[in-house]
Amino acid sequence: MLNLVYALVAGIAVTVIVKVAGFSLIAGLVPGTIVFLGAYVVLARRTFVEVQQVMEQVKKEFESMPPNPKEQKVRAEKAVKLLEAALPLGKKQFLVESELHAQIGMIHHLFKNTEAAMASFSKTQPRSYLARAMQAAIYFQRKDFDAMKRSFEEAVKHGKKDGMVWAAYAWCLQQNKDVDGALKVLSRSVAENPSDEKLKSALTALQNDKKLKMKAWEPMWWQFGLETPPMQQPMFQGGGGRRARFMRR
């Protein structure tokens, strides 16, 4: 937003300067356009670097997460505050605010703060597909299956290459006794991802009247909160343990 405005102003300024110098408007448009594009790229990159620095701070809060639930909650709250403090960056660059709200919502969801999660998810763009998928999981738990389908459809539209999102959609449909719907979803997923063996195996299982199991997508699957991990462990760990997936764009 502001980055686009600043870049546009810079481009126009160069165009005007060239025109005032006695050259034609067309002659001024060429360097003006180059300056506009160059300035926008530099400013956008600077903003994304700032966002990435915040994400690194958030990541550190979840590394070596203590087993004490109270301490985990304190770190989660600190991470949310870090992300909320970065929201003004959304005024500089398109989609940044949406992605930050997506991260905030996922943290709330992971720590069972459903209302806060839904409030954050409502402020995201559909392209934040993991946020949409987790929103769908909450609708499933609330038995609002029409809303669940709408959210999952947005999730698979923008995250069509993420097999876990397709599988989560199918799992929820099967749990709701909509086996035909689950089969259609997995058929679509395989058509979009013909080399994804996990999706193919899931489709075969359903075709053979077997229960869809999400083990192939663990540990990320547990972040949806639809099944309990076999052993209760800290939700985030360092050194190869479970972590939140922080989306990058």
Image (cartoon, rainbow, N blue to C red):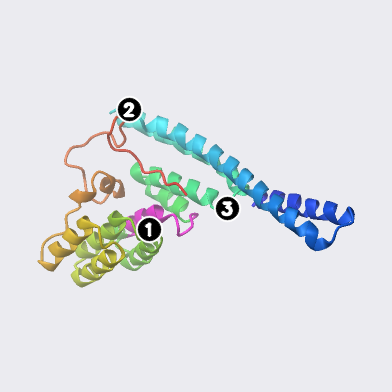
Residue at mark 2? 64
Label 2, label 3: how far apart the Cα atoms are: 33 Å
The residue lying toward the viewer, choosing from 174 and 14, is 14
Q: Amino acid at mark 1?
A: Gly
Dot 1 and dot 2 residues touching (CB under 8 Å): no
Dot 1, how many residues are within 10 Å of its Cα: few (below 14), some (14-19), or many (20+)? many
Magenta span contains residue 56: no
Q: Earlier in the sequence, mark 1 or mark 3?
A: 3
Tell me the residue at 38%/62% (across/down): 151
Disc 1 from disc 3: Cα separation: 19 Å
Residue type at mark 2 is Ser
Q: Which residues are magenta?
A: 123-139
Residue in front for this viewpoint, 151 or 23: 23
Kindly report the distance in space between the C-alpha atoms of the residues bearing marks 1 and 2. Answer: 29 Å
Image position, residue 173 (x, y; %) = 24, 65
Instruction: Say which element carries label 2.
Output: loop
Give the labeled residue for mark 1: 159
Foreground: 74 or 172? 172
